[in-house]
Image: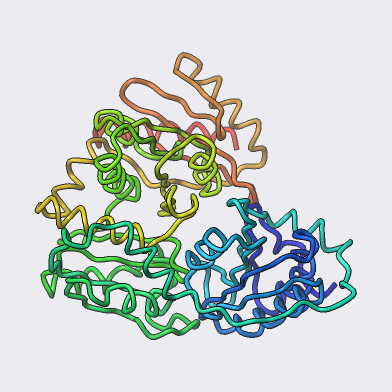
């Protein structure tokens, strides 16, 4: 086997092309997916990465060898694949993408009907036993754009929208193809940045949170006097907002912006959030008459809460936002339109809304390398034994005026530490205390 076992991740498949992930891997994965769905119907899409065309063709070859009939959407955003599976009841959908990873990476995200996520390790198990079918499956082209665009626009009330000035930084990713189609006929005054599809990402890293990635977008927001800036990652499942001053909006604040709009439409609706979001999320959702649902970290966990606990939407700090009426999957474009509708309706600057929704001081997640993750988590639990403690994902220690979550990485010898407190002074003190304690046990 001329590809690496390490490509099979907790949620998807991802690796460096061609040394870790290549056409052989793509064909084997296609054959495995065909076996998983008993040679059923599969819809396939790809992003604009330099290796995506070759990987995409090899994937289709494997699917067809396994007897699956394949509908090919070619170059689309990730949420178009999710939409197609849900709307047209495909047995599975596959997107060739490495999301926000650097240019040398590629991978696959796979979903079965009824929003069943297919994890990387599941595919790895299937590869050894998957065999070609007696006859090859068919291949057809599928134009998803008309129904997909109508679906995304259905989430907003078009008459409410105002001619807001909006800077959109596509980062040379799939948003450069989607935004011109989606904004056609809408009143927004668009300033586009890096809309040329280019998998080498010449203008900024595909990850909007990478160092320096947001500089141009922030400068442009201020220069043109925009009401908001919007940044997408490569496959567009993650979306990030800048206020009119060019400052990043925290992802859990964006979750609250979305939640407020959807609870307004459906009073009493439940909203899923992961446990490292600010405690302002459950507090404000409850205050607005909604029902907060707390989940472990990971967009799959948020999606499952929507499916099985009746939430209208959910989100997390990685900037994935999922919606019940989008087949419980995420969409950066639905999130973007909803935020723009809220800005149109509220008539307040985005910075003011952010201030209202961020009453606490919260630090970015810190990663610490440790030799024994289990032992250190147990030590944290013992040190703060007088707190309210739960172990939904790692350990969360909660006091009335501060909290910390310490959770293990699934793939690396790391502990991820998130701290929030009532004010900045206490935040600095408690974060320093926790980090010093963990380092002393490492």
**x, y (%) of residue 235?**
48, 69
**x, y (%) of residue 17?**
66, 77
Does 323 sit left or right of 442 as displayed? Answer: left
Residue drawn at x 24%, y 41% as measured from the top left: 264
Q: Reply above or below: 372 against 254.
A: above
Does 347 sit left or right of 208 as displayed? Answer: left
Query: 128 or 132: nearer the eye?
Result: 132
Which of the 4 quarters of the picture holds residue 111? bottom right
Colour scheme in use: rainbow
The C terminus - image quarter: top right
Q: How many marks?
A: 0
**x, y (%) of residue 424?**
25, 37
Q: Reply above or below: 308 against 10.
A: above
Query: 180 or 417: nearer the eye?
Result: 180
Which of the 4 quarters of the picture holds residue 158? bottom left
Query: 238 or 30: nearer the eye?
Result: 30
The N terminus - image quarter: bottom right
**x, y (%) of residue 263?**
29, 39
Which of the 4 quarters of the picture holds residue 44? bottom right
Residue drawn at x 39%, y 35% as measured from the top left: 270
Residue drawn at x 49%, y 83% as measured from the top left: 200
């Amino acid at each position: 086997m001329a590809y690496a076992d390490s490509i099979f991740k907790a949620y998807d498949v991802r690796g460096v092309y061609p040394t870790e992930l290549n056409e052989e891997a793509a064909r084997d994965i296609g054959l495995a997916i065909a076996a998983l769905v008993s040679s059923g119907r599969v819809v396939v899409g790809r992003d604009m990465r330099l290796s995506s065309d070759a990987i995409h063709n090899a994937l289709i070859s494997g699917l067809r060898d396994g007897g699956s009939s394949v509908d090919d959407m070619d170059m689309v955003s990730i949420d178009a694949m999710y939409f197609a599976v849900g709307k047209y009841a495909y047995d599975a959908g596959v997107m060739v993408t490495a999301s926000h990873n650097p240019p040398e990476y590629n991978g696959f995200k796979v979903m079965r009907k009824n929003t069943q996520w297919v994890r990387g390790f599941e595919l790895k198990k299937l590869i050894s036993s998957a065999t070609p079918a007696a006859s090859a499956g068919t291949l057809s082209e599928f134009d998803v754009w008309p129904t997909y665009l109508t679906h995304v626009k259905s989430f907003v009330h078009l008459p409410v929208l105002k001619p807001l000035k909006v800077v959109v930084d596509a980062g040379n990713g799939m948003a450069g193809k989607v935004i011109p189609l989606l904004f056609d006929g809408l009143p927004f005054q668009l300033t586009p940045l890096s809309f040329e599809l280019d998998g080498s990402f010449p203008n900024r890293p595909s990850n909007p949170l990478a160092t320096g990635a947001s500089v141009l977008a922030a400068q442009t927001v201020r220069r043109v006097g925009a009401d908001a800036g919007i940044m997408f990652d490569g496959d567009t499942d993650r979306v990030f907002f800048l206020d009119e001053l060019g400052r990043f909006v925290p992802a859990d604040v964006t979750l609250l912006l979305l939640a407020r709009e959807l609870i307004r439409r459906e009073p009493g609706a439940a909203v899923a959030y992961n446990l490292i979001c600010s405690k302002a999320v459950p507090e404000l959702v409850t205050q607005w008459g909604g029902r907060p649902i707390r989940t472990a970290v990971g967009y799959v966990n948020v999606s499952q809460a929507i499916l099985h606990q009746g939430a209208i939407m959910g989100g997390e700090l990685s900037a994935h936002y999922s919606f019940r009426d989008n087949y419980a999957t995420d969409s950066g474009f639905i999130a973007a339109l909803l935020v723009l509708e809220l800005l149109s309706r509220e008539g307040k600057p985005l910075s003011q809304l952010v201030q209202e929704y961020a009453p606490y001081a919260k630090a970015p997640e810190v990663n610490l390398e440790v030799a024994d993750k289990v032992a250190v988590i147990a030590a944290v639990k013992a040190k703060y034994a007088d707190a309210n403690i739960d172990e939904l994902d790692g350990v969360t220690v909660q006091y009335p005026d501060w909290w910390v979550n310490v959770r293990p990485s699934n793939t690396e010898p790391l502990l991820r530490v998130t701290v929030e407190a009532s004010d900045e002074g206490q935040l600095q003190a408690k974060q320093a205390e926790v980090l010093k304690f963990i380092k002393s046990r490492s």
